[in-house]
Image (spheres, grey):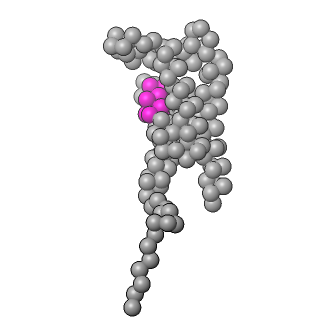
Amino acid sequence: MGFISFVGRVLFASLFLLSAYQEFIEFGNDGGPAAKVLKPKFNLFIKQVSKNTGLGVKTVIAATMFLKGFGGLLFIFSSSFGAFLLLIYLAFITPVVYDFYNYEMESAQFVQLFFKFSQNLAFIGALLFFLGMKNSIPRRRSKGRTTKTKTN
């Protein structure tokens, strides 16, 4: 069961790791294709962030790469912190990137964005399930600390 759980975590985390790797390779001086695609969707968010913190699109893309990459690596090793980083990434990026609510229901783009939005909601559910299961399993006691009581 442990090996199957590990393989499942590797396959799940590979979605995030491969995406982060691709963004890292294409990053460049301007933030790469991810920045070009996300810039129109991030405009309002970036204006608020830039005004308050001075961060730009390139920094936001780098932060999402970090959350996906580091969170994915930690998640492979069954880390709750890694799952939490992936949750933060998904909660931040899903409503901004997959803005199906800005399109007509009959359009093809609405269907594609709604499908991706629903997929990310399923990922969030899987991560919440992982965290819930991880917290519900009682911790093993070390052999030296267990005490046996005799009954007469």
Q: Position of residue 29 (x, y in %)?
A: 59, 8
85 magenta-colored:
no
Q: Quadrant of the N terminus?
A: bottom right
| Residue at 66% from the left image edge and 19% from the top image edge | 25
96 magenta-colored:
yes
Q: Position of residue 81 (x, y in %)?
A: 47, 40
| Residue at 60% from the left image edge and 27% from the top image edge | 20
Question: Is 10 displayed left or right of 89 in the figure?
Answer: right
Question: Which residue occupies the extreme top position in the image?
Answer: 29
Question: Which residue occupies the extreme left position in the image?
Answer: 52
Q: Quadrant of the C terminus?
A: bottom left
User: Would you identify the image quadrant in which residue 28 lies?
Assistant: top right
| Residue at 39% from the left image edge and 10% from the top image edge | 54
Residue 76 visible within the image: yes
Tell me if residue 71 comes above or below residue 56 in the rendering: below
Decide which of 129, 95 is in the foreground and name it: 129
Decide which of 54, 113 is in the foreground and name it: 54
Q: Position of residue 150 (x, y in %)?
A: 42, 84
Magenta range: 88-97
Question: Is 82 displayed left or right of 9 in the figure?
Answer: left
Decide which of 115, 12 is in the foreground and name it: 12
Predominant secondary structure, magenta span: helix
Marker count (numbered): 0
Q: Position of residue 62 (x, y in %)?
A: 53, 20
Question: Which residue occupies the extreme bottom position in the image?
Answer: 152
Residue 37 visible within the image: no
Tell me if residue 113 comes above or below residue 56 in the rendering: below
Tell me if residue 109 comes above or below residue 53 in the rendering: below
| Residue at 46% from the left image edge and 69% from the top image edge | 146
